[in-house]
Amino acid sequence: MVEPILNTAFPNKIDTTKKVEQFLPKGVEAPTANGKSFAALVSQVTNDGINAGNNTEIQGTKSLNKSTDIVDVVTAVTNAEVTLETAVAIRDRIISAYQTIMRMPI
């Protein structure tokens, strides 16, 4: 685990967390020194993708029963599509990084 760097040169440090939070979307918190692990982050993103897919299926079923508006169905499908494209882009970057590491001389 990476320990935070202590800044002894500037004892009156500026709290950058509050400055960062003003630029983040609502509901998103600034990272902290004791934040989530990478595994927890991957798990959360995976669960979000699964939930987006499930929501798409629910909206599709509701549209067959004529109990929802077509706009809700299109929104759910678009959300699932964006989630899938994000997952594919992340996968491609991980594979590219792995290939770069494998090409490095020992």
Image (tube, rainbow, N blue to C red):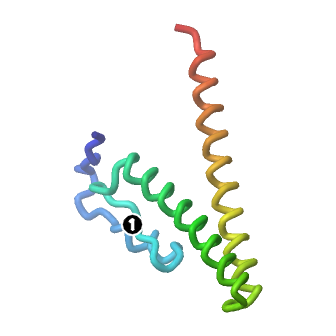
Position of 97 compared to 2: left or right? Answer: right
Position of 26 compared to 67: left or right? Answer: left
Note whether 99 is above or below 17 in the view shown. Answer: above
Q: Which image quadrant for residue 105?
A: top right
Tell me the residue at 34%/49% (across/down).
Answer: 37
Tell me the residue at 66%/77% (across/down).
Answer: 61
Position of 32 compared to 84: left or right? Answer: left
Note whether 78 is above or below 10 in the view shown. Answer: below
Residue 93 percent coordinates (x, y): 64, 39
Tell me the residue at 50%/57% (across/down).
Answer: 45
Note whether 59 is above or below 51 in the view shown. Answer: below
Q: Nearer the viewer, residue 14 or 104?
A: 104
Position of 1 compared to 77: left or right? Answer: left
Image quarter hosting the N terminus: top left
**Amino acid on which disc 1 is placed:** Thr
Q: How many marks?
A: 1
Q: Nearer the viewer, residue 13 or 58?
A: 58
Q: Which residue is mark 1?
A: 16
Badge 1: how crowded within 10 Å, few (<14), some, or many (20+)? few
Residue 63 percent coordinates (x, y): 71, 83
> Residue furthest toward the front?
65
Q: Nearer the viewer, residue 51 or 86?
A: 51
Provide the secondary structure element on which disc 1 rests.
helix
Tell me the residue at 51%/63% (across/down).
Answer: 48
Q: Which image quadrant for residue 30?
A: bottom left
Note whether 13 is above or below 3 in the view shown. Answer: below
Residue 9 percent coordinates (x, y): 26, 50
Residue 38 percent coordinates (x, y): 40, 47
